[in-house]
Amino acid sequence: MSMKFDSKTPGGPLEDKWSKHIFDIKLVNPANKRKFDIIVVGTGLAGASAAATLAELGYNIKAFCFQDSPRRAHSIAAQGGINAAKNYQNDGDSVYRLFYDTIKGGDYRSREANVYRLAEVSENIIDQCVAQGVPFAREYGGLLANRSFGGAQVSRTFYARGQTGQQLLLGAYSALSRQVANGKVQMFPRTEMLDLVVVDGHARGIIARNLITGKIVSYSAHAVVLATGGYGNVFYLSTNAMASNTTAIWRAHKKGALFANPCFTQIHPTCIPVSGDHQSKLTLMSESLRNDGRVWVPKTKGDNRIPADIPEDERDYFLERRYPSFGNLVPRDVASRNAKLVCDEGRGVGATGLAVYLDFEDAIKRIGRDTIESKYGNLFDMYKQITGENPYEKPMRIYPAVHYTMGGLWVDYNLMTSIPGCYALGEANFSDHGANRLGASALMQGLADGYFVIPYAIGDYLATRSYDMVPTDHPEFLKAEHSKNT
Amino acid sequence: MDFTLKIWRQKDAQSQGQFKTYQLTGIGADNSFMEMLDELNEHLIKNNEDPVHFDHDCREGICGTCSLYINGRPHGPQKAITTCQLHMRSFKDKDTITIEPWRAQTFPVIRDLVVDRSAFDRIIQSGGYISVNTGGVPDANETPITTSKANNAMDAASCIGCGACVAVCKNASAMLFVAAKISHLAQLPQGKVEAESRAESMVAQMDKEGFGLCTNTGACSVECPKEISLTHIARLNRQYYKAKQASDYIPDKEEIHEG
Ligand code: SF4
Ligand code: FES
């Protein structure tokens, strides 16, 4: 089978592509938008922002989520922040620098045109969120605060305490709720997509299960937008929410949507290690901990003395030893690989041997317990809550865990998958993060796709389509429904 | 660790429910409460019995999906955490643990421990937002906001919509949840414009859903996993009062202080 990969990236200089494309896109007349129905699956950052914005434009939206409320999607768990090329700190940031860092961080495997557009619209995202009432952190003068994140050399990360994902999602959820009230979005909570329905080569609907009644129902539309997140839970344990089960993009793939870069999975170095057989998921702690914690294991294999009894010269600070200029702040993938390496050598710590120490003893001596508490209090509490150990007295134990998937459904410049009329947004697509995502860029991409890309891009397709609806008793629907019922 | 579990079983909203007792042995102290329930369900499934239905998703205390009344307290015995953050080491070996769903008429039981909290969504839909469309908004730094306002707004905004406040309230009032949203938005200049109409419509929806009246007993705030403060209820009352005063403008206290 040969397939033509046409990303449909517009020509011309990188920095003009998106504005030129917006101008070239065929428009759907405002009065005609209400003749089109769009299905949006998933109500995380990408899905909620897409559903709300498309509804504002006049399209009829059917939005689906398996949770009991759209506000609960897993975007909510992101702690750290959201990047944007605002250059509010006057430290030399720019659209080009954010673009460059993203491309380089992704090991040159992302699509340049998409990433440039992402960096461009990042500025609008912050404006939009502030207008919605997202309570970002501020400086004493009242302007927005920033911090640098994940090794970036500029301060471009906006944050809302340790709850940035939650607050951004509540912003998108509020916009979505407003459109539900306006009657432009029909919301289907506790409903899980089971299959994509393709008619004459075009995505024309979905089959979904009502998770309360168990009933399987068909929904027809003119286009289907999948914003269903990544596939981290194909691994036995990950930091993803329990119900994030990858079904939607997998079914789309089985129906012919191509899948790109499935091996590009981000392994996060600072997770709380596995404690027993019945563990259901892993919990991530912010990697900011590595700013002050020192990572080590015993020098000798099988040394199971308690950490306080292991003298300094019998400890191996393996990141500091191997990467003297970065020390404990090596990039995520390097930190993760090295932790696994020392554990494979039999030098891992804790009951399972699958952990390394993250030690704050020196930092507490250097800057005091109070400063550590003000910086990391929440994280220390969380660690104690989960493990029952006090990290002020005993080094934390950490181990890498699957956290984010850069790969996903292949999409073109319009975020359309290889099935016409089927789109993939946010973590569900593959285009922006290459082989490795920068910290604080997942939230940025979800909202960029939902608020600022799909609302334009989808018009390019719909403008060429007829208003006719495929009835849900069409053979393709019946076939798909039948296959789910047996 | 071994436990005796008394769990509320109910087939659906229409059926009568009852407690059923289960014995569970060999549970690790490091297991989370939800992992303990997972284990129970594995046994039940193996024995061809219907597993216990309960809500959960993130299992890290942020999505607000999990619920459960545990030994008479929402989200269990510890302060400021959700049920999914509770671990079995908080209990004693051989303890009897009673597990019930949220109890409130406005949160009907769907099955076993799962309840319908969609009333919360409808309250937000009635006005829990700032009416802006995507695009065409001013630059984010155009309007400075004092750190105290931003922090207060953030305190209120940290509500996860779990519903523990309603479940614990003897009147099943949703005041803390509603107040948190109203207070979050009313403190920001962007949200001030609609503050009064928002308060009015959200309170009206809350009443329409059948939530009880607030008698200031304060149990909500004590049991709230995010420690949402009662002062937000005071702010709601102020906004609501202002709205009810029709167009007469009454400056709120903070405006007088901050000039
Ligand atoms: S106010 Fe607290 S208890 Fe009530 S819904 Fe919000 S987080 Fe839950
Ligand atoms: S499962 Fe998400 S808060 Fe408990």
Image (cartoon, coloured by chain):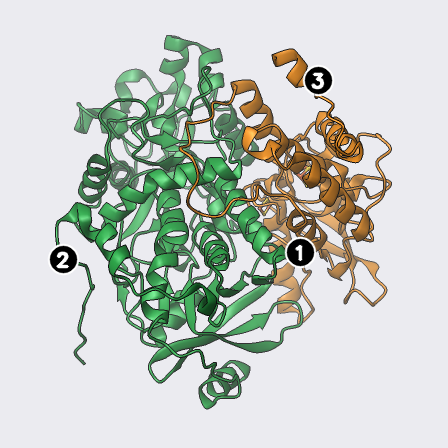
Chain colours: A green, B orange
Separation of marks 1 and 2 at Cα, in angstroms = 53 Å
Distance between the Cα atoms at labels 2 and 3? 58 Å
Q: Amino acid at mark 3?
A: Lys
Q: Which residue is mark 3?
A: B253
Disc 3 sits on a residue from what chain? B
Q: Are marks 1 and 2 on the same chain?
A: no
Q: Nearer the viewer, residue B38 or A162?
A: A162
> Which of the pair B194/A191 is nearer the observer?
B194
Looking at the rendered image, the disc whose residue lies closer to the viewer, 1 or 2, is: 2
Q: Looking at the image, which residue sits at the far left?
A: A12
* Residue A67 x, y percent position in the rendering: 58, 57
In the displayed structure, B38 sits above or below B128; it is below
Indicate left or right for A129 with B237 as reference: left
Residue drawn at x 19%, y 44% is: A103
Farthest bottom residue?
A: A475
Residue A400 drawn above or below residue A196: above
Q: Quadrant of residue B55?
A: bottom right
Q: Chain of mark 1?
A: B
* Three-letter residue code for mark 2: Gly
Badges 2 and 3, same chain: no
Give the spatial CA distance, label 1 vs label 3: 44 Å
